[in-house]
Image: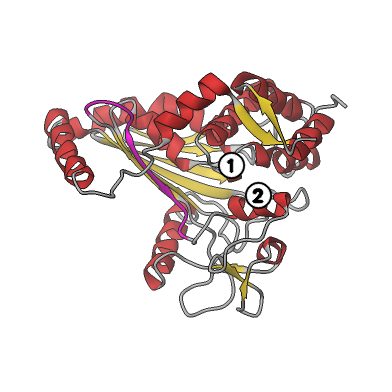
Amino acid sequence: MSDTLHFTCEALADLMVAVLMNSNVSEKNARSVAAALLAAEIDGRKGHGFSRIPSYAGQARTGKVDGQADAEIMKELPGSVMIDVKKGYFYPAFDLALELVPAKARANGIAAVAFHNSHHCGVLGHHVEKLANEGLVALVLGNTPQAMAPWGGNKPLFGTQPLAFASPRENGLPLVMDMALTQVARGNIMRAQQEGKPIPEGWATDAQGNPTTDPEVALREGVLLPVGGAKGAALGLMVEILAAPLTGSALSTEATSFFTAEGEPPSVGEFLVAIDPDGFAGRDQFLSRVEVILQSITAQDGTRLPGGRREELRRSAAEKGLDVPANLVDEAKALAGQI
């Protein structure tokens, strides 16, 4: 039997919706979540894609995430809004933010959104890309359950602390930069664990601070290493302050795992900023100067722009579909009540 099974994008999304709706998730929320996980799978971000379905469904079944939650506005000012995710999935809450932010940014030059009592934020680059498609410059970040030690320490204090930035361009897809402040996101380690593969040395240490290539050890007791040494750890502190105290959400040390079904909701936070270039130097000047920067990069041999493979991957998925692990398909079908 093949290790992978082939799906069209639509069929894979339908399977994920079926799993979630069979796990006490509303249809609206299930479709929002499935769309986000499918987008990650298409773009090759598989640690945030279909592989998340078992843990997402398990948490909805135990109530660790509220699959029926409808995000709502807690506080609104002309240039800002605070959204209560209500311990549900982040993606429907971002859908709500997307209805509000473009108009606020255009009216004020800049707008911000705080997400309170939230959950795993997935591929943050996809969220800011949607705003860049509206002509806005966008930055979003979030805290996650503890995984990274402060510089010089050996006990986890901050999460992987993902952040993403997107800028519109004159033509083509927006420029998108998306990263975790650890050497790798936990989702990549989880995927290695699911596939029975080791992780590269340098991603994580065990509880004693020794390098490990065992994904089980890295997930259960390990410490993830920051990018850029002390600078990456300092940026992790910045993300923690913006994502947790500013949004009234759980600190990374207080948040429960995104992977297990047991325990209280993670209740983490995300913070989003959207900027309208017309509120500053002006759209035309902004876009033309961005192109000068990007062309100066691509003029050098061996360079490429961040996220440059998206267009090719999306075209391939639309034309040819996707291959996903067969064992995950079997698990998903069982969760959906299809076997």
Up-down: is 254 above or below 212?
above
- Tell me the element at label 2: helix
Q: How many marks?
A: 2
Q: Is residue 20 left or right of residue 92?
A: right
Residue at image position (44%, 51%) is: 179
Q: Amino acid at mark 1?
A: Lys
| Residue at the disc numbered 1 | 46
The answer to whether mark 2 and mark 1 are in CB contact below 8 A is yes
153 is within the stretch colored magenta: no
Spot occupied by residue 192 in the image (x, y as percentages of width and height): 66, 53
Question: Can see residue 119?
Answer: no
172 is within the stretch colored magenta: yes
The magenta region covers 170-181
Residue at image position (50%, 55%) is: 244
Instruction: Depth check: give the residue in front, 24 or 209.
Output: 209
Residue 336 falls in which quadrant of the image?
top right
Q: Amino acid at mark 2?
A: Arg
Up-down: is 73 above or below 119?
above
Residue at image position (54%, 54%) is: 185
Q: Is residue 48 left or right of residue 281?
A: right
Q: Which mark is residue 191?
A: 2
Residue 38 falls in which quadrant of the image?
top right
